[in-house]
Image (cartoon, rainbow, N blue to C red):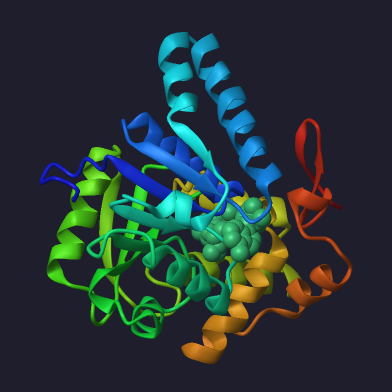
Amino acid sequence: MSNSNGNVAVVAVLGAGTMGSGIAQVFAAAGAAVRLYDVDLARVEKARDGVKAGLAKVVAKGKLTAEAAEKIVAAIAPATSIAEASRGAELVIEAAPEDMALKISLFREAMAHAPKEAILGTNTSSLSITELGSRLGAGARTIGLHFFNPPPVMELLEIVRGVATADETVERARAIARAIGKTSILVNDVPGFATSRLGVILGAEAMRMLETGVASAADIDRGMELGYRHPMGPLKLTDLVGLDVRLAILEHLQKEIGEQFRPPPILRRLVRAGHLGKKTGRGFYEWTAEGPKEIR
Ligand SMILES: NC(=O)c1ccc[n+]([C@@H]2O[C@H](COP(=O)([O-])OP(=O)(O)OC[C@H]3O[C@@H](n4cnc5c(N)ncnc54)[C@H](O)[C@@H]3O)[C@@H](O)[C@H]2O)c1
């Protein structure tokens, strides 16, 4: 059991990609023993190397001792099976691809080995926590623990409460957030939760403005950066997140909530062209080693 101050001794992290590796680092830095599992075992080693390299930069800046960095990396133990990762874990958190059937199968396997009271936390950005908990037959201890990219840097933890999530699970999640140095918000289980729902609608409106010639991408972004103090404009942010990822979220929210989430044609066109943003070198901007450049 996690104790009342939210410290978790053992955490299983399932999925060692972008989010899983960062989540593993966050818990390891907070003193937990982390077991990191991925279906692709090489990803676990890659994740540990990534954590190591990231921490080396923090050490170089003098913000962490080399010893402390080593301790964090050492606290992330590779697990070769879900069973090995989950045994004795008070919290099982998954960061596998956005696919309900896949997440259900991961948790089913974990539930067969984890303690009966372990919290089942999912990092899903859009899937229903209520449906996941119900299909697992464990709604009371299923909860959304939505981290932001990159997890070690971003301060927010969006806690998503399913219809059957127990008060005790919510309280434990809140305490865990504090213990790992995050500020949490509590949101009921609705499509897109609170953050994606607002974030994607701003991005979609910016795209509609761009394609109807209201202003250039850079000017739309600058407007929000300088006029509204957003650290990054909505189009640049879409490039960072990935245009394909944003398109999938908009399609999901259009189906679940309504027409205001209809994906703008420009987004579909760019995705079809393979312009997915920073990861492919081009989206609403061209991405070079020096950063984003305006496309004229
Ligand atoms: N990337 C983001 O900015 C972001 C932000 C918040 C939430 N999320 C959510 O986090 C989750 C993971 O996203 P990501 O960006 O880290 O994806 P990713 O593709 O970087 O990582 C997913 C990892 O899961 C592994 N995997 C696939 N099948 C598996 C299985 N059966 N068992 C264990 N591991 C398996 C893959 O090998 C990969 O390493 C998704 O649900 C996503 O919606 C992503």
> What residue is shown at x 56% (from left), y 54% (from top)?
15
Tally the marks: 0
Q: Can the viewer see residue 273?
A: yes
**Residue at the outermost left position:** 4
> What residue is shown at x 36% (from left), y 61% (from top)?
121
Work out whether residue 223 or residue 74 is closer to the camera in this orientation and state it: 74
Rendered location of residue 30, percent (x, y): 32, 32
Rendered location of residue 259, percent (x, y): 55, 90
> What residue is shown at x 78% (from left), y 57% (from top)?
283
Q: Is residue 274 left or right of residue 149?
A: right
> What residue is shown at x 47% (from left), y 34% (from top)?
76
Q: Is residue 87 left or right of residue 83?
A: left
Question: Which quarter holds ligand 1?
Answer: bottom right
The answer to whether 63 is drawn above or below residue 210 in the figure is: above
Rendered location of residue 130, percent (x, y): 34, 81
Work out whether residue 157 or residue 38 is closer to the camera in this orientation and state it: 38
The answer to whether 130 is drawn above or below residue 58 in the figure is: below
Rendered location of residue 233, percent (x, y): 58, 52
Q: Is residue 259 left or right of residue 207?
A: left
The answer to whether 208 is drawn above or below residue 276 in the figure is: below
The answer to whether 44 is drawn above or below residue 199 in the figure is: above
Q: Can the viewer see residue 65?
A: no
Work out whether residue 276 or residue 6 is closer to the camera in this orientation and state it: 6
